[in-house]
Image (cartoon, grey):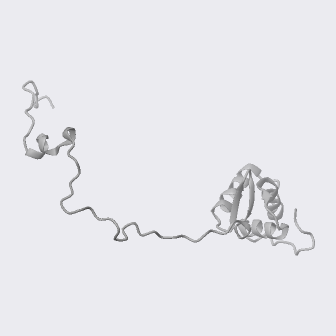
Amino acid sequence: MRNEASTPINPDLPITEIAYRLLKSAGQPQHYRDLFAEVLKIKGWENENAARLMAKIHTEVNMDARFWYKGNGVWGLREWGPRPTGTKVININSGGYRPRRGFRFPEDEENDLEDQDVVRGEEEEEPEDWDYDGI
């Protein structure tokens, strides 16, 4: 995976820097198992709890903006990925539409607030068998 002609990677570097340099020297996206196994080898952690360390590497690579997940377990560098297109801002109120003066939405008889007790300030009567002393 690694280009042997390149200089060795310092094991004291952070995990994400090692992964970045490995991908950069490979020149192409790699499956996470291959990439992370190489990171473990460089760090000297191949005999440790591999599952826990792979999860740690995966989390750190996932949080680093330099990496790009292509899908199916394959990671590459964001600099290799598609370039974001420009964003166009559309002004939705460009002066073209205004409701005409006096415009009102049609009345909805079921939801007419004037017919609701809350709007008129009327209170509901409590049932006579309601016992406040028992609370």
Q: Dividing the picture into quarters, in which one does residue 125 lie?
A: top left
Quarter the N terminus occupies: bottom right
Residue 33 located left or right of residue 98: right
Q: Is residue 38 above or below residue 133?
A: below
Image location (x, y in percent) of residue 116: 14, 41
Image location (x, y in percent) of residue 119: 12, 46
Q: Is residue 125 above or below residue 85?
A: above
Quarter the C terminus occupies: top left
Q: Is residue 100 above or below residue 21?
A: above
In the displayed orientation, state which residue is furthest to the right: 5
Residue 60 located left or right of residue 94: right
Q: Residue at x 73, y 70 (%)?
A: 17
131 or 126: nearer the eye?
126
Q: Is residue 18 above or below residue 37?
A: below
Q: Dividing the picture into quarters, in which one does residue 78 lie?
A: bottom right
Q: Dividing the picture into quarters, in which one does residue 97 lie?
A: bottom left
Image location (x, y in percent) of residue 126: 9, 31
94 or 122: nearer the eye?
94
96 or 30: nearer the eye?
96
36 or 76: nearer the eye?
76
Image location (x, y in percent) of residue 85: 61, 69
Q: Residue at x 8, y 45 (%)?
A: 120
Q: Residue at x 9, y 35 (%)?
A: 124
Q: Residue at x 9, y 24 (%)?
A: 129
In the displayed orientation, state which residue is furthest to the bottom: 7
